[in-house]
Image: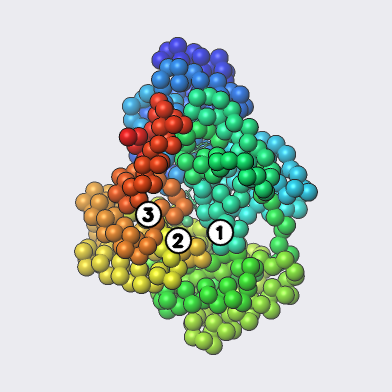
């Protein structure tokens, strides 16, 4: 190990190989569920350095855990407790490499923070639409490795759909130069889409070519109260019909989730939540003009009101008001974190079956655990719910997880299966859902995934223990 550490210092400089000091931010996951111990935290600056690090680790038979912003919700980016894994932090690889305005593409290092990519695009008059509550710290490499979703998927798709090319250091330390900005390229197997969503288990993404879009001429945001999820789904259908491709955000928030925001961040002033079971946050991004957008948006809200789909609504009158509404939605995660650990489920269900799923699953949970709190919110426009379960009042949150996590997970995921859904919509598998995936995913798909893992990472050194266990 001493030889390896010396070699790593030669590659990146001794300042960038940390073995002592405060490594908490690298070793503990965002939700504070687990803390691991790294052999060293190694922070390269270039792709060539990443390739040399991988070669050195392969030679020494040492496994590598790639890490971007360490905002994973599924414990995917921290080392295990053995003290034998290299934590490869991509944070120093943070250059915007180039922008091609005619091709509508931007090429960035994988350690670029998402918000910096959004700002770089905006500076030259374009939109990079990926938007997550963690955008101030998560990185493009992490976004692509988890195929992140977020709040604009209904219009622009998830991270995979926003990526045209990759540069990857493979598990043997070779560099795949795939930074094409091509929208058409049918030359065999789709390696880009194999690495996207692979959560660092097949190689390390060092750079990406991403799609840019014209900035919308106008954005409108509204907050509506609905009596139940069925009505929220009706509102979604009406929004698709009325706004067409202008619909760019459709988020749903349950009363209990909003109550947590109200409790922990009263300054955010949550509207309309006290008298309605759910609220919906809608956004339209119009390519024509503010007046066109507003006319369409007002038609939508008036129809929804007269058809008794919504009971009340506010339309943001300024950018500041729109931001304030979005801030409420984005702070549900922080409010939950302030409340204590809960049992998280990031699931997707066909939109047409979501109302039935929620009614059915809510009833089973409350039958099983008297007083359990359901923190239900998410990206309804994509059929993606964060269907979380919190301890009943008076019960310690950690004890609740210890006693009930397994049975609640089984209950929820059995329902997800019954309703034709997925056990991970956007957060990935990490280490938290490895066993769940094994249980619920199609066995042939699992077998093919293991073959791919074995072929691309034969020594199982790339983020082992995440996503899938080799045969
Ligand atoms: P990390 O957490 O560092 O890593 C995530 C995974 O990717 C790990 O398996 C890691 O090993 C791997 N990895 C990281 N970088 C690389 C690389 N360069 N090459 C290969 N593998 C790599 N997620 C959503 O999808 N939608 C949301 O709306 C959303 N909102 C969030 C809000 C908050 C407040 C928080 C804390 C998280 C949220 N997340 C959301 C989850 C998380 O932010 C995303 O999964 C994000 O994409 C992770 O990026 P990261 O840079 O932090 O990756
Ligand atoms: C969100 O949509 O806010 C995120 O995915 C984070 C979470 O699930 O808490
Ligand atoms: Zn989400």
Q: SS of the residue at dot 1?
A: helix
Q: Above or below — where is 430 with respect to 289?
A: above
Q: CA distance from mark 2 to mark 3?
A: 10 Å
The residue that disc 2 covers is 384
Q: SS of the residue at dot 3?
A: loop
Q: SS of the residue at dot 2?
A: strand
Q: Earlier in the sequence, mark 2 or mark 1?
A: 1
Q: CA distance from mark 2 to mark 1?
A: 10 Å
Query: As drawn, which residue projects farthest toward the top?
Result: 3
Q: Above or below — where is 273 with respect to 173?
A: below
Rate crowding at label 2 as few (under 14), some (14 to 19) or many (20 or more) other CA atoms within 10 Å. Answer: many
The residue that disc 1 covers is 153
Left or right: 431 with respect to 404?
right
Residue 259, by quadrant, is bottom left
The reply to whether residue 338 is visible in this rendering is: no
Question: Which residue: 46% across, 64% down?
Answer: 383
Query: Considering the image in quadrants, where does the N terminus appear?
Result: top left
Residue 423 circle label: 3
Residue 36 circle label: none
Rate crowding at label 1 as few (under 14), some (14 to 19) or many (20 or more) other CA atoms within 10 Å. Answer: many
Q: Is mark 1 within 8 Å of ligand 1?
A: no
Q: Earlier in the sequence, mark 2 or mark 3?
A: 2
Q: Nearer the viewer, residue 354 or 318?
A: 354
Question: Which residue: 56% across, 49% down?
Answer: 160
Give coordinates of residue 162: x percent, y percent. 61, 50
Residue 263, by quadrant, is bottom left
- Whether pointer 2 and pointer 3 mark residues with C-beta atoms closer than 8 Å, the reply is no
Give coordinates of residue 391: x percent, y percent. 28, 58
Q: Is mark 2 within 8 Å of ligand 3?
A: yes
């Amino acid at each position: 190990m001493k030889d390896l550490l010396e070699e790593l210092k030669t590659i990146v400089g001794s300042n960038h190989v940390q073995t002592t000091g405060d490594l908490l931010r690298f070793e503990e996951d965002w939700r504070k569920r687990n803390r691991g111990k790294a052999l060293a935290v190694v922070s390269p600056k270039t792709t060539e350095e990443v390739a040399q690090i991988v070669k050195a680790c392969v030679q020494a038979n040492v496994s590598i855990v790639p890490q971007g912003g360490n905002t994973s919700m599924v414990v995917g980016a921290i080392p295990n407790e053995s003290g034998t894994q290299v934590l490869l932090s991509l944070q120093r690889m943070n250059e915007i490499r180039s922008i091609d305005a005619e091709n509508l593409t931007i090429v960035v290092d994988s350690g670029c923070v998402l918000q910096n990519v959004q700002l770089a695009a905006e500076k030259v008059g374009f939109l990079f639409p990926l938007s997550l509550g963690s955008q101030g710290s998560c990185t493009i490499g992490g976004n692509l490795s988890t195929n992140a979703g977020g709040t604009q998927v209904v219009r622009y798709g998830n991270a995979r759909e926003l990526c045209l090319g990759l540069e990857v250091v493979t598990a043997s330390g070779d560099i795949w130069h795939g930074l094409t900005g091509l929208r058409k390229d049918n030359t065999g197997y789709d390696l880009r889409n194999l690495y996207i969503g692979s959560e660092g288990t097949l190689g390390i993404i060092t750079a990406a070519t991403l799609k840019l879009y014209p900035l919308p001429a106008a954005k409108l945001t509204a907050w509506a109260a609905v009596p139940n999820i069925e009505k929220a789904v009706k509102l979604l259908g009406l929004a698709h019909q009325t706004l067409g491709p202008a619909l760019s955000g459709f988020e749903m928030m349950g009363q209990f989730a909003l109550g947590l925001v109200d409790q922990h961040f009263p300054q955010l002033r949550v509207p309309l939540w006290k008298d309605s079971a759910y609220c919906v946050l809608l956004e339209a991004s119009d390519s024509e003009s503010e007046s066109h957008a507003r006319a369409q948006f007002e038609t939508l809200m008036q129809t929804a009101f007269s058809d008794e789909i919504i009971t009340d609504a506010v339309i943001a009158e300024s950018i500041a008001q729109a931001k304030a509404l979005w801030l409420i939605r984005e702070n549900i995660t922080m409010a939950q974190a302030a409340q204590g650990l809960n049992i998280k489920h990031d699931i997707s269900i066909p939109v047409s079956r979501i109302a039935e799923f929620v009614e059915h699953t809510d009833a089973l949970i409350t039958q099983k655990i008297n007083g359990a709190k359901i923190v239900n919110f998410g990206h309804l426009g994509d059929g993606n719910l964060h269907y979380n379960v919190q301890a009943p009042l008076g019960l310690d949150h950690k004890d609740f997880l210890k006693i009930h996590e397994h049975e609640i997970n089984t209950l929820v995921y059995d329902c997800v299966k019954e309703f034709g859904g997925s056990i991970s919509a956007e957060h990935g598998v990490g280490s938290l859902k490895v066993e769940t995936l094994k249980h619920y995913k199609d066995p042939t798909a699992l077998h093919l995934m293991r073959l791919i893992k074995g072929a691309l990472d034969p020594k199982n050194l790339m983020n082992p223990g995440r996503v899938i266990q080799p045969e």
